[in-house]
Each structure stands twice: as structure tokens, then as C-alpha cells.
Image (tube, rainbow, N blue to C red):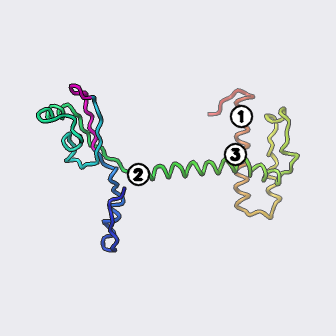
Amino acid sequence: MYTCIHVSLKNAKSLICDLLQNSEDIRCKCICPPYRDIEGQIYKQNVSLKDCNCLHVVEPMPVDGKDVEAYCLRCECKFEERSSATIKVTIIMYLSILGLLLLYMVYLTLLEPMLKRRLFGHSQLIQSDDDVGDQQPFANAHNVLSHSHSRPNMLNKVEHAQQRWRRQVQEQRKSVFDRHVVLS
């Protein structure tokens, strides 16, 4: 709930301040334990720090007259403040990163195999289960990429770096699983 209704240009600064300060960002929370025949309750009210006490927050007051002071002494009131702008920015960043990871997953599962089939041919991608650990399926990728002059130079560099990384990973797998040697 926004607390501003300014529309003039000279009040633009106060308009922005009012929009950023949401009335739900500050509150006072009073926890009142059971008192005589009254059950314990939690009271919440959007009030300022100076008004954060039992008399301003507990409405309707469950006791009358002289019992009000005794009841309020048992209540514990705490002022709570949060930044909804920070929470919104954090959630937007989290969802953006999640979306990027989802797009990357779609690329890896759908587009990359199609590009590799087109680049290396369908027959090279199909391997039996026995050959998976023994051969490097993209060992001749550098040769294929070096002969393709129609592709932009930057894409060749990226593909070359990717193939080099894959060879390193394959060598590490071979060292760990075949030779039982951990690289340090």
C-alpha cells in the first residue's frame, strides 16, 4: 500500500521517497502471554518506533481498568523494520539467475546436440556403451573447425577452448578412474 498521492513535478522527490517507504516495512509486534482467563495473543500494528508499546499496539485491549497496566507489563513488544526494496531486488536477481540457468540447460539439451550433428555428422555422435570411456568423441573437433573458414573467428576460438577443456576433463577422468591417480 503506497502512501503518496503527489502529482506535481516539484514534489517528485517526496513521491519517490513515499513509494520506497512502504507502510508494511515497519511494524511493532507485541507478544502477550496468557493473563488470568485471557489466552495469550500476538498483536501486530504498523506504528513508529516511539509508539511501539502495549498501549498503542494491543487493540482491542482484552482487560479493563487497573488490569491494563499489569497486562501490558507482561507483554513483550519489539519494533521490526525491513527493506522491501532489498527483498524485491534479491528476488529479481535470484529469478534472473535461475532463468539464465534454465536457458543454458535448454541450450545444452536441445541446441548443442543439433549443432554437433550438423558439424561432425550423425555417425560420429553414436557410440556404443563400450566406447564411451575409451575414446574421445570430439577428438578431431580442432581439425574440423580449422577447415571451416566460413565461421567467424571468435566462434572458432570459443569452440577450440571448449574442446581443449573437454580433453582436459577426459584426461582427468582417465587418470582418476583408470589409473586411480588424483591430480593435485
Residue that label 3 marks: 165
Q: CA distance from mark 3 to mark 2?
A: 38 Å
Q: Give whichever of 154, 91 is nearer the camera.
A: 91
Query: In the image, which disc is placed on residue 54?
Result: none
Assess whether residue 29 is covered by the magenta stretch: yes
Q: Give whichever of 153, 28 is nearer the camera.
A: 28
Residue 56, image x, y percentages: 20, 44
Q: Give whichever of 124, 32 is nearer the camera.
A: 32
Magenta span of residues:
28-38
Are the residues tagged 3 and 1 within 8 Å (C-beta)? no
Residue 124, image x, y percentages: 86, 45
Query: In the image, which disc is placed on residue 173?
Result: 1
Quarter of the image where one finds residue 180: top right
Q: Residue at x 24, y 38 (%)?
A: 77
Q: CA distance from mark 1 to mark 2?
A: 43 Å
Assess whether residue 172 is covered by the magenta stretch: no
